[in-house]
Image (spheres, helix red, strand yellow):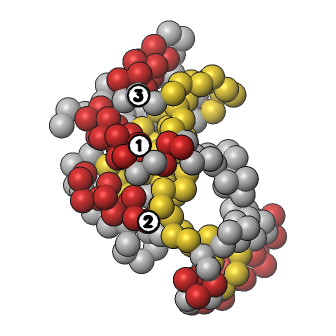
Amino acid sequence: MASLSHFSGEPGSEVLVLSELRRAEIQAYEGELVGEVPSRVYGRLGPIVFRRASRYWIASGPVPAAVAQDIYAALAGRSVRVNGNGMARAREAGKLEWRLPDGTLVVPTDEEVGFRSLLARFPEIEGVRGPRVFNDDPRALGATAYVPLYHIDSLEGLDLFAWLLRKHGVHEATRPPWWDPCS
């Protein structure tokens, strides 16, 4: 798979972003100037937001674990990185984000001490990524597993990623109100 062209964010370069989104059949929108390479143009397919970085796409939003497994099976090691890691399967520890229906993040209990220590040093992080509960059995609490972030390194990968989201009906889902509005 061919790598993506360099996106500079210079005036007029958003034409590249629009053409890549159009090719992948991802709806384009214009918003605030944000991103690794600042741009007003972004894509959206259901709850998933696509923003162009310099040489890859960033797809952020709640991709259900079952869909993530299909994405991994189709694209592993080829052009899609789970949470930016090309070797990681979505089901591996640390790759899934578990959320209760109200958006509360379920975090393993072995991370609580580290989090509390961090919070003591940086109280301003309280509430970042929403409320959380520490528990080692998120399913017992009724939580759902998601992969929150992908990096996509080729047009073919973007096309297939978007196609898989549509195949699973993710494009018809809405973005949960508790999902990070900045992503």
> Relative to residue 6, is residue 3 drawn left or right?
left
Which residue does the numbered mark 3 point to in the structure image?
A: 25
Secondary structure beneath label 3: loop
Near mark 3 (Cα within 10 A), the count class, few <14, some 14-19 or many ≥20, is: some
Residue 49, given in percent of the width and then of the height, sits at: 55, 40
Q: In the rendered image, which residue does mark 1 sit on?
A: 166
Name the residue rendered at 58%, 88% in the picture: 140
Q: Which residue is mark 2?
A: 65
Res 179 → quadrant = bottom right
- Can residue 121 be seen in this snapshot? yes
Residue type at mark 2 is Ala
Picture quadrant where residue 17 is located: top left
Could you tell me how far apart the alpha carbons at marks 1 and 3 are, in whole angstroms? Answer: 10 Å
Query: Where residue 42 sits in the image (x, y, percent)?
Result: 55, 29
Furthest residue in direction right, as rendered? 123
Along the line of sight, the residue nearer the viewer: 26 or 114: 26
Report helix, strand or loop for mark 1.
Answer: helix
Residue at 62% across, 79% down: 142
Where is 49 relative to 179, above or below? Answer: above
